[in-house]
Image (cartoon, rainbow, N blue to C red):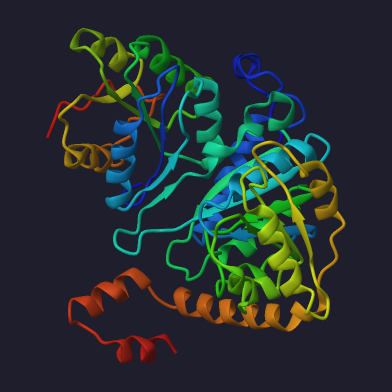
């Protein structure tokens, strides 16, 4: 499914800092993808139903509030529960190194922290879209940089 | 197609499982994608298609959301929210979902299907594929389809080719009274809505538009609302459902339909992106592409 992707960029939970999400959305737009920006303070349920209706192939979650360890897995679980196994989830924001492995184990395929280049995020999308690494895939692969 | 709803999701999203299974929504979303990609022929459905157009930031999404709060759950409504594709990268930022609070209401959600649409290679504020999508959605038992065009004004009348009724949204502080005299989309409007009446200057705009439009043979009504505050929304929601079509706009609609039929034939006759790249790279010319598309 290489080429143009439909990507949901969402901010789950109580977090009003959306500059990062907007910059990522913009970078993906400039790389030729269709980005659906859901706005602030979305629940995992709202994000998953947006992905269903929009037929998204990727979901990018941005969190700077510290609630990522609760919210990101919840999105992955709901996707699997609704049969959206092929959707690829990635995240970004302030995610401490120590929290990342647990998120990868839940099916998040990349975590991008401050200082990540937009080029790298675009490279991840291109790479991930070439392999079957949706939240429901048995593949334990995750992005470890370019 | 109807498959029993997933218990966990039904529990997570109140009302999700009632009447409209999530798997149906998924199937519908996949169908929409396939039609957009030209891989699926749309089903033929009949029903009301409302086009909502107006300049960027005039409150189209917000107004549609307010209307959805009135129409649903009584009616099943599909919204096709169009945003522009980048002429540089081919990507798009689709931001119309942000305003749609009606989707957060579990009682309404199952009566609404909102899909963000990018214009892709098509010209104008409403890509021709929207016509197919409307037909398909109406065949899927939606009572009405609302098209939200790209933010547009004046000469941008493409939605007239697809919508049965055209509603033009205006707002305060958008230029002087001469704007209301200009030719274009206002002549095709079946209804003109001045939004943001909670801000100063709305009455002036209503007067200017009314005075100008009253010179038409079949002047459309001009109404004043505030989507933000909810003022005038309920009567507007009723008015739209029984809105009469201006007979003077029929010829213009045919003209737009002919234009999109031509554009569609042209775009579907080739790999358009490859053609642009080829001209850009000096490998072919506009003349040679036109010749090969015949």
Can residue A83 be seen in the rendering of this structure?
no
Q: Is residue A6 left or right of residue A113?
A: right
Q: Which x, y percent locates residue B66?
A: 69, 40
Write the residue at 69% across / 24% down. Answer: B106
Q: Which quarter of the rendered picture does the C terminus of chain B lie within?
A: bottom left
Horizontal relation, residue B273 to residue A113: left or right: right
Visible residue check, residue B258? yes
Q: Which image quadrant is residue A128 in?
A: top left
Q: Is residue A64 above or below residue B37?
A: above
Residue B80 versus residue A139: which sits nearer the camera?
A: B80
> For the point 45% across and 58% down, which residue is it?
B84
Question: Which quadrant holds the N terminus of chain B?
Answer: top right
Q: Position of residue B172 (x, y in %)?
A: 60, 55
Task: Tell me residue A7's x, y (percent).
Answer: 40, 40
Residue at 37%, 72% in the rendered image? B272
Residue A65 to residue B250: above or below: above
Foreground: B138 or A46? Answer: A46
């Amino acid at each position: 499914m290489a080429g143009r992707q439909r990507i949901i960029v969402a901010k789950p939970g109580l977090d009003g800092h959306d500059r990062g999400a907007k910059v990522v959305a913009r970078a993906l737009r400039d790389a030729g993808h269709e980005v659906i920006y859901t706005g602030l303070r979305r629940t995992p349920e709202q994000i998953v139903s947006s992905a269903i209706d929009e037929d998204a192939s990727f979901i990018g979650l941005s969190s700077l509030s510290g609630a990522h360890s609760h919210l990101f897995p919840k999105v992955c679980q709901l996707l699997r529960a609704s049969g959206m196994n092929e959707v690829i989830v990635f995240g970004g924001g302030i995610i401490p190194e120590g929290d990342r492995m647990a998120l990868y184990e839940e099916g998040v395929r990349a975590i991008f922290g401050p200082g990540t280049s937009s080029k790298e995020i675009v490279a991840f999308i291109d790479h991930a879209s070439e392999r079957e690494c949706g939240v429901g895939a048995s593949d334990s692969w995750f992005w470890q940089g370019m | 197609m109807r498959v029993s709803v997933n218990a966990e999701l039904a529990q997570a999203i109140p009302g999700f499982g009632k009447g409209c299974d999530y798997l149906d929504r998924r199937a519908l979303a996949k169908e929409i994608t396939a039609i957009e990609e030209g891989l699926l022929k749309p089903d033929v459905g009949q029903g009301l298609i409302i086009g909502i157009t107006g300049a960027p930031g005039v409150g189209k999404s917000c107004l549609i959301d307010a209307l959805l709060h009135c129409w649903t759950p009584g009616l099943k409504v599909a919204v096709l929210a169009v945003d522009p594709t980048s002429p540089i990268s081919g990507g798009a930022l689709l931001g119309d979902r942000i305003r749609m609070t009606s989707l957060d209401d579990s009682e309404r959600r199952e009566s609404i299907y909102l899909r963000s649409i990018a214009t892709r290679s098509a010209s104008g504020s409403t890509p021709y594929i929207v016509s197919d999508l409307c037909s398909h959605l109406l065949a899927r038992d939606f009572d009405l389809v609302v098209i939200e065009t790209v933010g547009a004004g004046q000469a941008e009348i493409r939605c007239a080719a697809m919508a049965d009724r055209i509603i033009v949204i205006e707002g305060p502080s958008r230029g002087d009274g001469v704007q209301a005299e200009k030719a274009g989309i206002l002549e095709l409007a079946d209804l003109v809505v001045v939004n943001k009446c909670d801000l100063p200057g709305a009455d002036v705009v209503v007067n200017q538009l009314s005075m100008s439009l009253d010179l038409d043979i079949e002047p459309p009504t001009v109404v004043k609302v505030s989507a933000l505050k909810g003022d005038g929304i309920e009567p507007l929601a009723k008015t739209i459902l029984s809105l009469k079509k201006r007979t003077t706009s029929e010829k213009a609609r045919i003209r737009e339909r002919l234009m999109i039929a031509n554009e569609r034939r042209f775009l579907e006759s080739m790999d358009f992106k490859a053609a642009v790249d080829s001209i850009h790279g000096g490998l072919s010319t506009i003349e040679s592409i036109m010749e090969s598309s015949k």
